[in-house]
Amino acid sequence: MARSGKSPVKQSHLRIIGGLWRGRKLTFTPADGLRPTPDRVRETLFNWLAPSIRGARCLDLFAGSGALGLEALSRGAGYCDFVDTSAAAIRQIGLHLQTLHGGERACCHQGPALTFLQEDRACHDIVFIDPPFGKNLVDPICERLAGSGRVSAGGFIYIEMAALERAPNVPSNWRLHREKAAGEVAYRLFELEG
């Protein structure tokens, strides 16, 4: 049998760790800068969010593999917008939503996060900000969200960064709810004061 000389595209795996889709394993194509939030970080984050997740409207910026938004939907979030610049990533998230029968509770948007925030006027209860590390993408997003009415009063903003990066510059009405570090990842959950 002839071979093309091209090696098959290596696939990575994502596991939903809680809720309706608990234990489901999903595949995605790895890409530069794409690193799904580790299981233990997601477990901690969603323990923090447990009292607020049911029925929440979520926004997964820099969605990548979709790990955060899919976990939120699995745990009872009412809706999630997924945003990423990669057409392949958005297509893959869409396929995962079809597989999980969750498409009616989500919408996928291809394009830059800042552009989405400029054009979309929806208000969200939980916003996930998990960009590629070391690219200075967090502060402009926080600035765009400040006073925009895109986060509901009492809503949460989750920020994941490299542990060596300086803490994000957030608006004065974002109260630090919880923070933790795991290996090379620092993660913080802020609450928008009403």
Image (cartoon, helix red, strand yellow):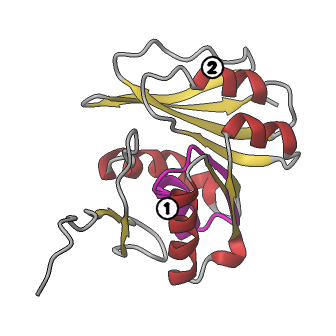
* 58 to the left or right of 122: left
* 53 to the left or right of 40: right
Q: Pick whichever, 122 or 31, lies toward us.
A: 31
Q: Amino acid at mark 1?
A: Glu
Image quarter where the C terminus lies is top right
Q: Amino acid at mark 2?
A: Asp
Residue at (28%, 64%) from the top-left corner?
9
- Residue 68 visible? The answer is yes
Dot 2 falls on a residue whose secondary structure is helix
Res. 139 mark: 2
Q: Position of residue 92 (x, y in %)?
A: 50, 67
Q: Position of residue 137 (x, y in %)?
A: 57, 25
In the figure, 165 relative to 188: above or below?
above
Q: CA distance from mark 1 to mark 2?
A: 25 Å
For label 1, the residue is 71
Q: Position of residue 190 (x, y in %)?
A: 61, 30
Q: Pick whichever, 50 or 87, lies toward us.
A: 87
The magenta region covers 59-81
